[in-house]
Image (cartoon, helix red, strand yellow):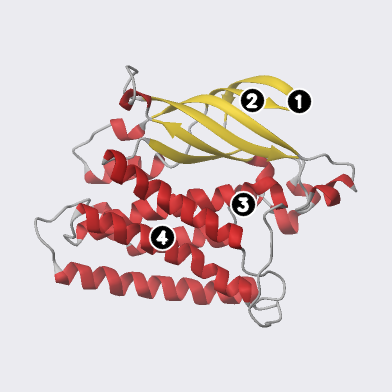
Amino acid sequence: MRFRLLLLILTWLIAADSLAQRVDTAQFSKKRFNALIITSAAAYTGSMVGLSQAWYKDAPRESFHFFNDAPEWKQMDKAGHFYSAFQLSSVATHAFRWTGLSKNKSQNAGSLTSLGIMSSIEVFDGFSSEYGASLSDIAANTAGAAFYLGQQKLWNEIRIYPKYSFHSTGFASQRPNVLGDGFSQELLKDYNGQTYWLSVDADKFFRFPKWLNLAVGYGAEEMVYATDSANRSIHLNPYRQYYLSIDFDLTAIKSKSKAVNMLLYFANMIKLPAPALEFSRQGVRAHAFYF
């Protein structure tokens, strides 16, 4: 997940300040709805203007075009798109609930808003000579939003949570302009250290501790360049990693404090350190605490 994706998430986290209250009104409030739309539009516009200056200003513009980046980075960036679209759908849904929209309408509006925000970046990419709109990015965005909405329609709740974890690697220092220079940048740019998870709320399916989840994860390593061939030219051999772990369901913790509940809501987007098994071409490895 690159900086631009985080920027879009932060746009909605700031715009949807209603999350701090987590209040469902009995009926629709036009005043709240207008406030949400105006605040969100201003935050989104400002972020997109800043993004255009920071990300695209040095790249020549050309006619709109597509670029197939599906084979790159072992699809780790697609996992980031999926994760981001899911989390944005959730945040936007809560924001619309604050205005008094029904749960069903809020979920629909939240998922569509997430898809619109996430996919609008492809318009910028499409006019940039260095990038190009990506159909696989759009597909990942759609899948993430649909994964949120589908669970709400099927179970009337979220039972499988996409989560994210990160650990530093030695690969970022080999290409810091792309993979990040320092932990804060590497956190967003170094795919080698990123792991994306699906954390299953197991007690919703069978007898299991309410606070404990089962999680499966996906990662990749030995990537300094986007393609396998480029990495092999510098004697690296990229490979995929699969994980099986336990996780902790922070949504099972209930507090009378709205601020604490909000913090738990956002903290639940992160996979906490826990024992894990790693499966890859390197064999099976056990980690006492993997993050």
Q: Residues within 10 Å of mark 4 (few under 14, many from 20)?
A: many
Measure how far apart labels 4 and 3 are at the Cα level: 17 Å
**N-terminal label among 4 and 3:** 3
Residue furthest left in the image: 26
Residue 186: % across, % down: 65, 49
The answer to whether the residue labelled 2 contacts the one labelled 3, judged by CB atoms less than 8 Å apart, is: no
Measure how far apart labels 2 and 3 are at the Cα level: 20 Å
Q: Residues within 10 Å of mark 1 (few under 14, many from 20)?
A: few
Q: Quadrant of residue 100?
A: bottom left
Measure how far apart labels 4 and 2 are at the Cα level: 32 Å
Measure how far apart labels 4 and 1 are at the Cα level: 37 Å
**SS label for mark 1:** loop
List the residue tagged with mark 3: 77
**N-terminal label among 4 and 2:** 4
The answer to whether the residue labelled 4 contacts the one labelled 1, judged by CB atoms less than 8 Å apart, is: no
Q: Quadrant of residue 167?
A: top right
The answer to whether the residue labelled 4 contacts the one labelled 3, judged by CB atoms less than 8 Å apart, is: no
Task: Say which amino acid is labelled 4.
Answer: Ser
**N-terminal label among 4 and 1:** 4
List the residue tagged with mark 4: 114
Task: Say which amino acid is labelled 1.
Answer: Gln
Task: Say which amino acid is labelled 2.
Answer: Glu
Asked if 45 appears above or below 93 in the picture, the reply is below
Q: Residue at x 44, y 66 (%)?
A: 117
The reply to whether residue 54 is in sight is no
Residue 174: % across, % down: 80, 49
**Residue 120 vs residue 66, the one in the foreground:** 66
Q: Residues within 10 Å of mark 3 (few under 14, many from 20)?
A: many
Residue 191: % across, % down: 66, 46
The answer to whether the residue labelled 2 contacts the one labelled 1, judged by CB atoms less than 8 Å apart, is: yes
Residue furthest front in the image: 154
